[in-house]
Amino acid sequence: MADILDLLPTHLVDRAAALDAADPLAEHRSAFVLPEGVVAYLDGNSLGRPLASTAERLRTFVDTEWGERLIRSWDERWMTRPTELGDLIGRAALGAAAGQTVVADSTTVLLYKLARAGVAARPGRTEIVADSENFPTDRFVLESIAAELGLSMRWIRPDPATGVTLEEVEAVVGERTALVALSHVAYKSAYIADLPGITAAVHRVGALVLWDLSHSVGSVEVDLDAAGVDLATGCSYKYLNGGPGAPAFAYVNAALQHEVTQPIAGWMGHADPFAMGEGYEPAPGIRRFISGTPPILGMLPLEDMARLVERVGIRAVRAKSRELTAFAIAVADEALAPLGVTVASPRDPDRRGGHVTLEHPAMAAVVEELWRRGVVPDFRRPMGLRAGMSPLSTSFTEVAVALAHVADLLKEGRA
């Protein structure tokens, strides 16, 4: 590690050490699985590290809740877990009061449920507004709903280096708009959209708004209730460290719950799941957005991390996230810019989420070699390295080491 850090200016290495020494969240890093083979991990915005305690939690679950209590656990604790965990995520990371958040399906399925419910709640309106730079799943789901219902897609085409602005939304919404669906943090650039401002603009024309919080939750402060957000969803395997395939969450504002009907009616969303009756009667409140049997096993790692975020406080998490991304940009400006690297993320910390995208024509080859060295960021076409830094598990020195390896590979064309 010392040798590779020699490639960075000494003051940057010293700054990383000083930031680590002063970091009030540094003690939590040891709570995560930190294998020796991973030199630096900067892909927390795709898959967070597991908590070490989760392994024992899963073993205990197999022995007791599943192995000993067996089917009795449904009555004892499992039936309420989706809404209890939803409330935990709501108060820890979403600014959402109880009774509005539930953990259920994958992000894709919940996007479909919420978007389909949203457009149905605005009959007679013919347009869905979305942006061309959003994550493919979001675009694909919305396009399929538009095709299913004979609606039109109205596309915002934002600057890829930033993201959707309030002015761009105001320019396209109107009396034909049923739903506006956007990501709060852009998955490419990490640009933070004006959630309160855009939500208010959508409401002024009588439409509903659906926010994808996949790159926000657990990293960026969100206050859904205060902003009057209608609908929101997001995955839990990034900054909430729920693990691969972990279930997502859905938020439906309490004021809207009586107005929307979710489109995938299933037995677990019924008012009386075990009545086994002929007709479907939706459960009251947020529980109606459950369809099939909840993924109880998948909720365990997510619950562990959500409780940690609640204990630490999302404000403290966000403060460190800002410092981590600022430090990454400082290293890039001084040590990587002379090698042709450019920063493709907002420099304003109020508009920058939890990752930094660095661009270079050779970045695909750089990332491939970084993985062989045990340095793990991710790559986004055509030439972006995304450095995703989870505030509770990433150190400043780890960021310095990773970017020193990038400098090493770019010098003399080693990539």
Image (cartoon, rainbow, N blue to C red):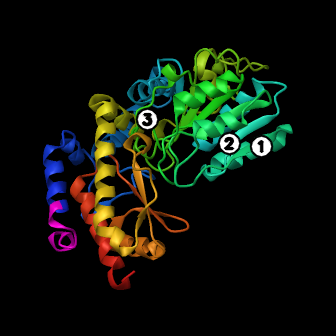
**Secondary structure of the residue carrying numbered label 2:** strand
Residue linked to disc 3: 66
Is residue 9 on the magenta stretch? Answer: yes
Q: Position of residue 75 (x, y in %)?
A: 50, 21
Q: Nearer the viewer, residue 95 or 125?
A: 125
Count residues near mark 1 (Cα–Cα under 10 Å), then give few for <14, some for 14-19, many for 20+.
some
- C-alpha span from label 1 to label 3: 46 Å
Residue appearing at x 30%, y 49% in the figure: 324
Q: CA distance from mark 3 to mark 2?
A: 43 Å
Residues rendered magenta in the picture: 1-11
Res 398 seen here? yes
Q: Residues within 10 Å of mark 3 (few under 14, many from 20)?
A: some
Up the image or down, 376 lies above or below 296; here it is below
Which residue has dot 2 on it? 130
The kind of secondary structure element at disc 3 is helix
Q: Is residue 123 left or right of residue 18?
A: right
- x, y percentage for residue 188? 52, 54
Left or right: 261 in relation to 214? right
Label 1 vs 3, first from the N-terminus: 3
- Does the residue at mark 1 contact the one at mark 2 (Cβ under 8 Å)? yes
